[in-house]
Image (tube, grey):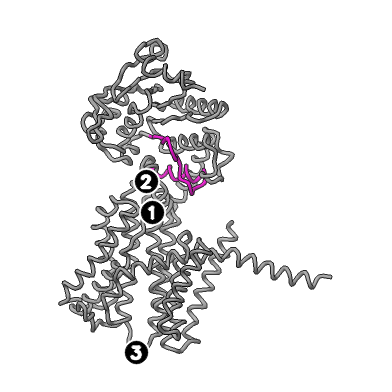
Amino acid sequence: MKGRYVSKTVACACLVAILALVPAVVKSPYLLHLFILVYAYVIAASSLRTIAVSGQISLGHAGFMGIGAYTSAILAKELGWTPWVTMPMGGLTAMAVAIVVGYPFTRLRTIYFSMVSFFFGIGLIAIYTLLSGYTGGFYGLTGIPPLFLDSKVPYYFFFLALTVVSLLALHRFESCRIGMSLKAVAQSYAIASSVGINESGYRVLALAVGCFVVGLAGAAYAHYIIVLSQNTFDVLASINLMVYMVVGGIGSFAGPVVGAAVLVLIPELFRGLKEFTPYVYAGVLILVIFLIPQGLVGLYQPAKSLMRKLRFGRWCKRAP
Amino acid sequence: MLLEINGLIKYFGGLAAIAELDMYVREGEILGLIGPNGAGKTTVFNLITGFLRPTAGRIGFGGRDITGMKPHVIARLGIGRTFQLNPFFSDFTVLQNVIASFFLHPKSSLWGAYFNSSIYRRNEAQIAEQALAVLELVGLDKVKDDFAKNLPHGYLKMLGIARALAIRPKMLLLDEPIGGMNRDEIDLAMKAIDKTRRQGITIMLVEHNMQIMDIVDRVVVINFGQKICEGTVQEIRENAQVVEAYFGVEDDAER
């Protein structure tokens, strides 16, 4: 058991090391841009799963990403503060909003929570339009101070680091006692509260943590992309985040990571197909949901046993 | 008196589920709450443990007014309970079910848990040990690594008791603890309940199976949300009103 855990840690460390070497090999700004997008959405989808662990499916998660993005962008632009200060403030603002709306929202459970979070996402877009003096409204927000000038390479490392730190933080959150209490709440709020778990408190906590992380990711995204459009954070984006999570595998920590990586890349890989790209995307979704209900991470076990079999076969041939 | 209920009323819409109920539970006793189906027994449990808010009336526990408190607060004050249906965390193993219930008395804060402080690690080790001890008490230590959803019904009922014990309650409310069990399981369950009582935990239980009467000290009979009588098991058996409302029906229904 311990050995397996160590080998997983080693595998993850190797993966990070390989990813850290990517800019040395990949020189195309476009490919680096894709990597950075994947990182941002890996963080967002993983933080959505933290909320899902507590038994709540949020359909307004991109809205919280937007709160982080707009807060940081506007503070940096209007007040001239450095993005290194405004980005954490973006995360904290998203968290504060999550706590304020969390108390009424978490009174609702299951589908009702999802619906109210969906409406919240729609409401946020209306607020952005209303505050178009600051947010730019339909025309988008321009002139956001960038984090780095000229090259995409520092951005690449920044986003890689942010992803690693966020994932470690979320993983710890889920695997310590807090995570176990969240899972207990998700399975039965009645039993959880009968053993003294403050179930609504824990659900607000999960919402707050998930929204802080996604707010931070949104803020980092804002200072990378420099131009914000409110469509980036609308309900369709929220649903996309949920799709990343479900297709990757909602039952495992790696799920949203794999899901976001694959699904952000698919439209880009099949760009050549022009207007047929969405069909490829839809095809992948349908295939995954029908064939691997656990999500893409469900491929891990069969792939492992297949590898083992192949190696075993070769070994058999060599043996006399 | 450990638990005192005065003038308890609960309306569901226009229907009075509990109509002016007065009752009490003495420290250290096993009280049986019985009555026909729909008499309001489980409603009483839900009112005591805060899952429902009473329309009127007062519930006192250990000298404190607990009326209208939230369920997790009442659990913290020392009232453990089991549920009639689905009494378990289905995706947890048996051991995890009990461990998750031990978090009521953490020695470390949430920050300590998050940053893996030494207090937290020691506490986790203690909890794992204590959870095993509770499982031994109810006889589930052999299946501790099985998933709860794969357990037979009788084991699940015992798991419910184990989980309620994990919060170190002063009082335990058991909703049909031996309902639907076979003879062997009933023996085990009754032994576990008896052992629990000898640890000084007061017990109030709802049960249809009259075998439970062997370990019950005192009985309260309710019907239509009202107490129709109370007394020792012997007194209840001889009460004509109870026989009419409850035992007569039960005799016919017995297979």
At numbered mark 1, what does the secondary structure look like: helix, strand or loop?
Answer: loop
Q: Examine the rendered structure and indicate whether residue A139 appears above or below residue A180.
A: below
Residue A150 tag number: 3
- Above or below — where is B254 with respect to B73? above
Q: Callout 3: 10 Å neighbours few (<14), some, many (20+)?
A: few
The residue labelled by disc 2 is A189
Magenta residues (range): B80-104
Pointer 2 or 3: first along the chain? 3
Q: Where is residue A219 in the image (x, y as percent from the top left)?
A: 30, 73
Q: Can residue A307 be seen in this snapshot?
A: yes
The answer to whether dots 2 and 1 both sit on one chain is yes
Q: Say whether disc 2 or disc 1 marks the residue closer to the N-terminus.
A: 1
Q: Which mark is residue A55?
A: 1
What is the C-alpha distance between the residues marked 3 and 1? 43 Å
* Residue in view at x 35 percent, y 28 percent: B38
Q: Eyeballing the image, is A309 above or below B70?
A: below
* Amino acid type, residue under disc 2 in the picture: Tyr
Mark 1 packing: few (<14 Cα in 10 Å), some, or many (20+)? Answer: many
Quadrant location, the N terminus of chain A: bottom right
- A165 horizontally vs A13: left or right: left
State which mark lies toward you, 2 or 3.
2
- Identity, as a three-letter code, of the amino acid under mark 3: Asp
Q: Residue furthest right?
A: A320
Across and down, in percent, residue B219 comes to 38, 19
Mark 3, secondary structure of its residue? loop
Mark 3 or mark 1, earlier in chain: 1
Disc 1 chain ID: A
Residue A24 place in picture, x, y as percent: 49, 86
Q: What residue type is labelled 1?
A: Gly
Chain letter for mark 3, please: A
Question: Which quarter shows the C terminus of chain A?
Answer: bottom right
